[in-house]
Image: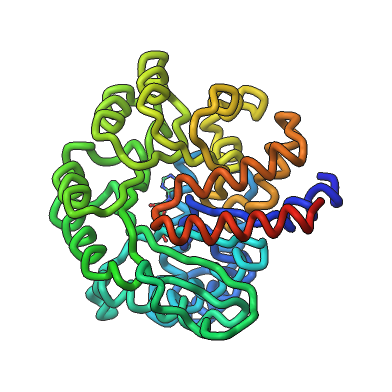
Amino acid sequence: MNREELEWCVSVPKVELHAHLNGSVRNSTLFELARVLGDKGVIVFSDVENVIMKDDRTLHEVFKLFDLIHILTTDHSTVTRITKEVIEDFAAENVVYLELRTTPKRNDSIGMSKRSYMDAVMEGLRAVSSVDVDYSPAGLKTNTFNGSTRKKMYVRFLLSIDRRESTEAAMETVKLALEMRDLGVVGIDLSGNPIVGNWSTFLPALKFAKEKGLYITLHCGEVPNQEEIKAMIDFFPHRIGHACCFDEENWRKLKSAKIPVEICLTSNIRTETISSIDIHHFVDLYKAKHPLVLCTDDSGVFSTSLSREYNLASSSFGLGKTEMFQLAEIAINFIFADDGVKADLRATFEEAVKKLN
Ligand code: 6MZ
């Protein structure tokens, strides 16, 4: 990786639309948490260390890793800590608009409800100190914003439904999202192990969310389940993630529906969902001018960053600086926020282009 090119990618303002909170935790934080639980005898530290350090994982192994990460992170104070760190890490990458997604978790044994989990997330957001964060759709709530000249970042939340969940649990997540709208929750994501669960289980909750005006993004086509892919496109979500294993017919459908695709290059390669970067569907979508946005997915788990994803796209697909800047800027069109936010972001990019040239 060329250092000068990577630094340039860092300096470009960027929009991140597909980042899972627990997949974006720093390795150093995971080790620290594992050490504490190891000392308490809850886990064996060396086992955890080996699992976290492993570089290439199949998609199946990734979900086993998430179960481990959740053991380390799922109490209120840790959720607050990782939220603060993850937002600050994205800010350091020059991400000017972040949609962070997470699965609200209920754990009766520690008195955690989906709501209290999200309250802990919100506390983490309010604790961010390296940048001013605008997190309210009404533009009213910020951490320190007024009159400040510090760097500013927009943060919005998507609540994830895990494919292991029941219809009732999915519905609870949607109701929670509606309750938390003025705290920056803008939509719903469907994620989790793609070989688990059925589309029909989640459809009632997703339909309800859409009717109530929440934005919807779906993990779609991480495995070649063409029937599900077709049903998902017919649902017409506002965006989809991945889109790796489409047959020709579904590919045509996606393109004519013009549903924006969140592309996660490193994640797809590391999990072997796509066998090699030079056959990645980014190229086809990019050439067709299909709406797409580069994203990290799980920057901690896959040891990447948004700048690295841009750098990888540039080196793999031969895109120059003008194309890369345009790619970053065009992502504004696909965010789940109002025209005021979009206009403000466009102004940020206009300023940046003057400095970069
Ligand atoms: C599908 C994924 C994922 O929600 O606990 N998640 N789901 N495909 C992926 N690609 C590799 N990466 C992450 O963050 C972790 C959760 O996000 C989903 C999984 O459900 C995982 O448990 P949160 O913050």
Residue 166 location (% of width, % of height): 17, 51
**Relative to 8, 151 lies left or right:** left
User: Which image quadrant is residue 100 in?
Assistant: bottom left
The residue sitting at 29% across, 25% down in the picture is: 230
Figure quadrant of residue 112: bottom left
Image quarter of the N terminus: top right
Percent across and percent down for residue 66 are: 45, 56
Can residue 24 be seen here? The reply is yes
Residue at the spot x=31%, y=39% of the render? 237
Q: What is the x, y in percent for residue 145?
A: 52, 81
Of 309 and 255, nearer the camera is 255
Tell me: residue 274, above or below residue 300.
above
Residue at 64 percent across and 41 percent down: it is 326
How many marks overall?
0
- In the image, is 220 to the left or to the right of 163? right
Picture coordinates of residue 50 (x, y %)? Answer: 61, 57
Q: Please tell me whether residue 255 is drawn above or below residue 212 in the rendered image.
A: above
